[in-house]
Image: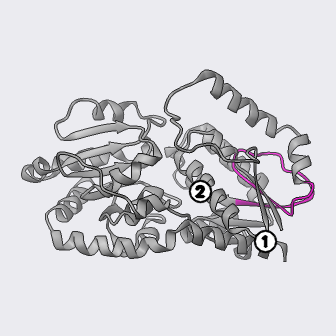
Amino acid sequence: MRVLIDATSLLLRSAGVKSYTYHWVKHLQKLATNDQVLAFPYLSHLPDLHHDRSIFRPAETYARLALLFFVNLPGNPAISWLSRRADIFHVSNQIRVTPRGPAITATVHDLTCWLVPELHTAGNIHADQSFANGIWKNAQGLIAVSENTRQDAIRILGIKPERIRTIHSGVPDAFFEATPAARSKPYVLFVGTIEPRKNVDVLLDAWHLLRRDVREQFDLIIAGPEGWAAERTVARLRSGIPGIEYLGYVPENELPGLTAGATAFVYPSLYEGFGFPVAQALAAGVPVITSNNSCLPEVAGDGAVYVDPRSATALANAIERVLTCPSLRDQLANAARAQAQQYRWEVCARRSLEFFHAVLC
């Protein structure tokens, strides 16, 4: 079996899908001893994921945009030539034109543009819905990164249940093996793009509701690049509030240590398709406080305390409870490590190869 994977998402700045593509392809190629897995446009090797993408480089950015335009040309000769001998072409959300011949598959990361459209730009909504109508509804097989996302796709898009399979995403080994980062003061950590869906403003409100003696014992560290509609939130983060530190973008190779060093990980997202930062915290054995919505209870299992993410009071109570109860933290940490074992990339890659073979049957 020969699988051609569209890896053009590696050209983008989006953290979650880019990390998924990189590690997924790496482990597929490692496991596919009797099959061939090629990644377009990186046929020989994948780019270094740790390269700093936080710096704007005009020439590099324009080259990426040109390549994305090129791959979507009707009858694109490069894709047509590569896919001529492929059995499966697995496409990303960047592809709008698919070649004739191979079976088409895709990964469904989330349906947040349908479920919480007010938390997306009009451009993102149009792009995702266009891709769903053109690719997802006509693909021979789909991978959903969580069972909750699978059910969303069945309910909202009318995907037949037998055409979509749940295969949980993976977590890099570095999070399972991480040495905690050394910092002068214990801290609570949030990792994620600063955008409305991640709900950082409610986290800041909740932090101010903590008992003063609790706040004085811990810092709140926010790590993640600026997304859309982030100006007000970033202004709050940079306003010099004592005990709150905004790190901005953190390279992927620094995240495991930063995550492992946290006393607790807080993620009050309004909706997720998988929730990579939560899974990474679980792998590092860090107690998690997260939302009681979407896939998050499925992903975190018994390794988390769940709250209504729209209630700053409920979030503050949960944070305070975890920070002031060592036995609860130990219980959550042990459950987190056990839950995270199913998020090994080897497991994801093996199940994905089984999925590809099933598509061809």
The quadrant where residue 284 appears: bottom left
Place of residue 52 in the rendered image (x, y in percent of width and height, measured from the top left): 50, 35
- Residue sitting nearer the eye, 101 or 86: 86
Place of residue 151 in the rendered image (x, y in percent of width and height, measured from the top left): 60, 70
State the quadrant of the N terminus.
Answer: bottom right
Place of residue 196 in the rendered image (x, y in percent of width and height, measured from the top left): 43, 43
The quadrant where residue 248 appears: top left
Q: Quick one: which residue is furthest to the left in this view?
A: 213
Disc 2: which residue: 23
Q: Main secondary structure of the magenta part?
A: loop
Estimate how packed mark 2 is, as few (under 14), some (14 to 19) or many (20 or more) residues with alpha carbons within 10 Å.
many
**Residue 246 magenta:** no
Disc 1: which residue: 34
Secondary structure state at the residue bearing disc 2:
helix
The quadrant where residue 14 appears: top right
Estimate how packed mark 1 is, as few (under 14), some (14 to 19) or many (20 or more) residues with alpha carbons within 10 Å.
few
| Residue 267 seen anywhere in this rendered image of the structure | no
- Residue sitting nearer the eye, 246 or 60: 60
Q: At 58% from the left edge and 72% from the top edge, which residue is drawn?
A: 347
Q: At 40% from the left edge and 63% from the top edge, which residue is drawn?
A: 177
Give the mark nearest the N terminus, 1 or 2.
2
The magenta stretch is: 84-106
